[in-house]
Image (cartoon, coloured by chain):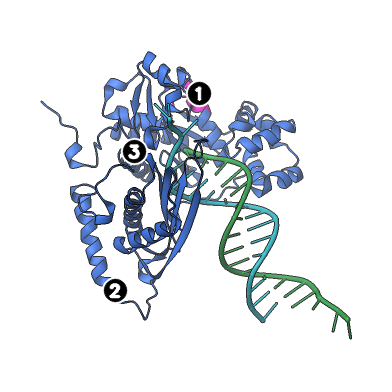
Chain colours: A blue, B cyan, C green
Amino acid sequence: MIALIDCNNFYVSCERLFNPALDNKPVVVLSNNDGSVIARSNEAKALGIEMGAAVFMIADLVAKNNVYVFSSNYTLYGDLSNRVMDTLQRFASVVEVYSIDEAFVDLTDMRHHNVESLMRQLRETIMQEIGIPVTIGIAPTKTLAKMANRFAKRDKTFNGVYLVKATEHINHLLENTLVGDIWGIGSQHKKLLIQNKISSAAQLAVANTEWIRKNMSVTGQRLLNELSAIPSIAWDDMPAPKKGICIARSFGTLLTTRKDISEALANFAEMASARLRQEGSCTSLVHVLLQTNAHRLQDKQYFRSVTIPLQVATSNASEIIRAALKGLDIIYKKGYNFKKAGVMLLNLVPEGNVQGSMFDKTDRLRSRKLMNSFDMVNHRFGKGLIRYAAQGFGKKWKLKSEKVSPCYTTDIRQVPVVVC
DNA sequence: TCTGGGGTCCTAGGACCC
DNA sequence: TCTGGGGTCCTAGGACCC
């Protein structure tokens, strides 16, 4: 048996944790740049606020119904997510963290336990120790566990945990799930399936495998197996080291000058290099991209990227910033309104495996020590305290984040104060 | 005025090798 | 005159996920 643990309206739950006045009120959390809705409380859903809705399009709804609006605060959500995942590890040995708010847990080696009561206990523990409500679906495959989770969310009588065991439970799930709502079926395949008279999960489960193989590749075939209770999606509980690190952002306002864009890119390059060091890796390819806003039909469009190779793989911020700015020199063009830029670090190798070069004059050990101190200071006293000159102090590129809550759990200057 | 960012997996096709 | 077949690696693009 496999359990899927899913935090309910996760970002909203995080905001509520430190602000109980939000309980039972409509709350939404916005994407980076405050552009669209990425999380909604049940009350906000009931008002008809859709996932992904553009903020300016729901402004009236928000004003009329006193909807509480927050910018996203990934530092807070990430920290609370880690705490939830740590709790899972105490209950099971095989845990696959699938996303910031979801994890699969393998229960096969717990045959002697009553898995349902174990999962109820887990749910209560998370609520008690962290304060985040979760819903748990338990079924023979990941896909069915996802489905069971949806059912548990929809039907309050399950009290947050739904165990799908017998064949008739599975059939009930399949008959009451539309193809478009199956995990792994997106808009394209949904369209294709409906055109071919397959509209429920039950119909998909008995579809012609040859046809599925031809039109939906092996992923489709695996999905069919999963619906028939045959586990076919591999476990990834030991994620491989990352192949690339990418920091790409839209700017708060449109930028045109090379100077403004270079500040943004220097900051992205620094952020990416910090993540690189955290992973214990080095990069030898710095990819830089720059683009205009495709939504602005009145603007000339421009989209370009370039890859700068480094002679010796590094995680040193200044080398990576320098490479990114060199890339910008190649792709920057005057006379455009730029909306977004990014830095990708590729060809990652573990720090210990870096291939030296005869022509390398850098003192690698010294450079690494310098970066360690750099990271330590910024970690202890707040991000951005020490910075490279190229990063500048301008805020033009910064994304909009007007309604961000404090980092209650990760910044000593922002912990909640209790007066008694 | 205003529409996220960061991923994975799969397939097809080209380059290259023996 | 005659011009293989099988393998690997890489990349681009599509579909999907949260």
Name the amino acid, label 3. Tyr
Disc on the earlier residue, 2 or 3:
3
Element type where label 3 sits in the image = helix
Please tell me how crowded label 1 is: few (under 14), some (14-19), or many (20+) other residues with Cα within 10 Å. few
Question: Residue at label 2?
Answer: A362
Q: CA distance from mark 2 to mark 1?
A: 60 Å
Q: Which residue is mark 3?
A: A77
Label 2–label 1 contact, CB within 8 A: no
Chain of the residue under the numbered disc 2 shown in the image: A
Which residue does the image show at 28% across and 52% down from the upper left?
A391
State the SS at label 2. Answer: loop
Residue A152 in magenta stretch: yes
Residue A133: tell me if it is visible. no
Camera-nearest label, 1 or 3: 3
User: Quick one: SS at disc 1?
Assistant: helix
Establish if A51 lies above or below C15. above
Numbered badge on residue A129: none
For the question of whether residue A174 can be seen, the reply is yes
| Marks 1 and 3 close (CB-CB < 8 Å) | no
Q: Which chain letter goes with mark 3?
A: A
Asked whether residue A219 is drawn in magenta, I would say no
Q: Amino acid at mark 2?
A: Thr
- Vertical placement of residue A213 versus A277, above or below: above
Query: Would you name the residue on which mark 1 appears?
Result: A154
| Magenta-tinted stretch | A151-160
Pick the front one: A4 or A21: A21
Q: Are marks 2 and 3 in contact (CB under 8 Å)?
A: no
